[in-house]
Image: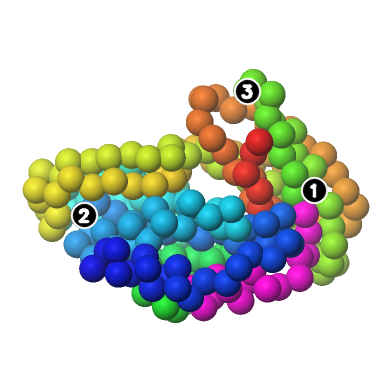
Amino acid sequence: MFRAAALALASLSLAPTAHAQQNPVVVELFTSQGCSSCPPADRILEELVKRDDIIGLALHVDYWDYIGWKDEYAHPDHTFRQRAYAREGDRTMIYTPQMVINGQQDVVGANAAELAEVINSYLTEAPKAYVQAARVGEDVTVEVTPVELPQGQTYEIRVVQYSPMRHASIKRGELAGRDLSYANVVEKTQIAGHWDGVAPQKFSASLSEALPAVVLVQRVGHGPIVAATKVK
């Protein structure tokens, strides 16, 4: 079933355009080791992160911990982010597995066909801004450039570090007895600064661990993600 979902997603995806490669689509998966319906979505994300035109991130939430297994990668900040997305989008509930695309639309994480349709709609959009990021040791330099952004908005420069692959042997709860893998597990997030979106600007940040990182340019208040890049 897991492989079929990934193949469905691949069969529906478009060839990346030039601007999609420069400004990849961000897919955030809200998942939990205590959620029996999450493994298919976890496997889909594992396929997505192989693509250059997509930034996939797994944010493990903590609200399923009460049913018998504490998710070792969960963090309350991830639950807060998911709830903030719901408020911003006038949604009345949160759930797992949920994927949020570019901070705007959400789909059931295991629904490969709907996910592919939403991703492809963003891949063909004209860019609103560009971001570049370079790393030297622990230091990251970020440069943002507006293309077509609304006036009067403020954007966060979010630097997200993640583990490319984590594993878990689950002993209790709905997934007891399963050995599972998780791609691009979010470990740390920091705000490098705020940008008015009017003129090009540079930011800097220091990374505390030797983990890979991405930069998201997101409207303050968990609004749309207008640009993203992997730190190189």
Residue 34 visible somewhere in the drawing: yes
Which residue bears the numbered disc 2? Answer: 34
Tag 3, which secondary structure? loop
Q: Is residue 198 above or below residue 166?
A: below
Q: List x then y, in percent, for residue 188.
A: 49, 37
Q: Is residue 54 above or below residue 151?
A: above
Which residue bears the numbered disc 3? Answer: 138
Q: Residue at x 29, y 64 (%)?
A: 3
Q: Is residue 74 left or right of residue 202?
A: left
Q: List x then y, in percent, for residue 18.
A: 73, 61
The kind of residue on which mark 1 rests is Val
Tag 1, which secondary structure? strand
Q: List x then y, in percent, for residue 107.
A: 43, 74
- Mark 2 touches mark 3? (CB < 8 Å): no
The kind of residue on which mark 2 rests is Gly
Q: Quadrant of residue 71?
A: top left
Q: Mark 3, residues whose alpha carbon is within 10 Å: few (<14), some, or many (≥20)?
A: few
Let me know if residue 129 is in the magenta part.
yes
Q: Is residue 230 above or below residue 16?
A: above
Quadrant containing the C terminus is top right
Q: 144 or 179, which is in the foreground?
A: 179
Tag 2, which secondary structure? loop
Q: Bounds of the magenta span?
A: 115-130
Q: Quadrant of residue 44?
A: bottom left
First-in-chain label (1 vs 2):
2
- Mark 3 touches mark 1? (CB < 8 Å): no
Q: 164 or 140, which is in the foreground?
A: 164
Which residue bears the numbered disc 1? Answer: 144
Q: Residue at x 19, y 62 (%)?
A: 36
Give the foreground label among 2 and 3: 3
**Cα distance in 3D space between marks 2 and 3:** 34 Å
